[in-house]
Image (tube, rainbow, N blue to C red):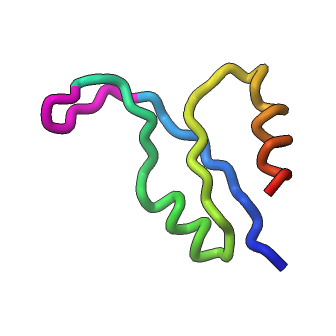
Amino acid sequence: MSKPLIGISTYLQPARWGVWDMPAALLPAAYPRLVQAAGGLAAMVPPDSPSYAAGVVAASTAW
């Protein structure tokens, strides 16, 4: 049996790395670690229009 794919929605936050200074899709590192510890496969999902949700779920079932 394969691991369940668990989508975790990210936050859109201002971020800076080196010369980058732009919005980034971020998530506390503990979230995917907890999903993995429970036997799941964590997928970070960036903020998007709710109208795309069904397509994202359909695509994930193709795995």
Q: Is residue 29 left or right of residue 59?
A: left
For residue 23, what is the image quadrant? Answer: top left
- As drawn, the residue found furthest toward the bottom would be 1
Q: Main secondary structure of the magenta part?
A: strand
Query: In what quadrant of the picture does the C terminus appear?
Result: bottom right
Q: Is residue 21 left or right of residue 57?
A: left
Q: Is residue 39 above or below residue 12?
A: below
- Asked whether 62 or 7 is in front, the reply is 62
- As drawn, the residue found furthest toward the left would be 18
Q: Is residue 26 left or right of residue 49?
A: left
The verdict on residue 19 being magenta is: yes
Query: In what quadrant of the picture does the N terminus appear?
Result: bottom right
Q: Position of residue 33 (x, y in %)?
A: 50, 67
Residue appearing at x 77%, y 31% in the figure:
53
The verdict on residue 62 being magenta is: no
Q: Is residue 23 above or below residue 31?
A: above
Residue appearing at x 45%, y 61% in the figure:
30
Residue appearing at x 58%, y 76% in the figure:
37
Q: Is residue 34 left or right of residue 28?
A: right
For residue 47, what is the image quadrant? Answer: top right
- Asked whether 38 or 49 is in front, the reply is 49
Q: How many marks?
A: 0
Residue appearing at x 75%, y 25% in the figure:
52
Q: Position of residue 15 (x, y in %)?
A: 28, 31
Q: Is residue 43 above or below residue 38?
A: above
Range of magenta residues = 13-20
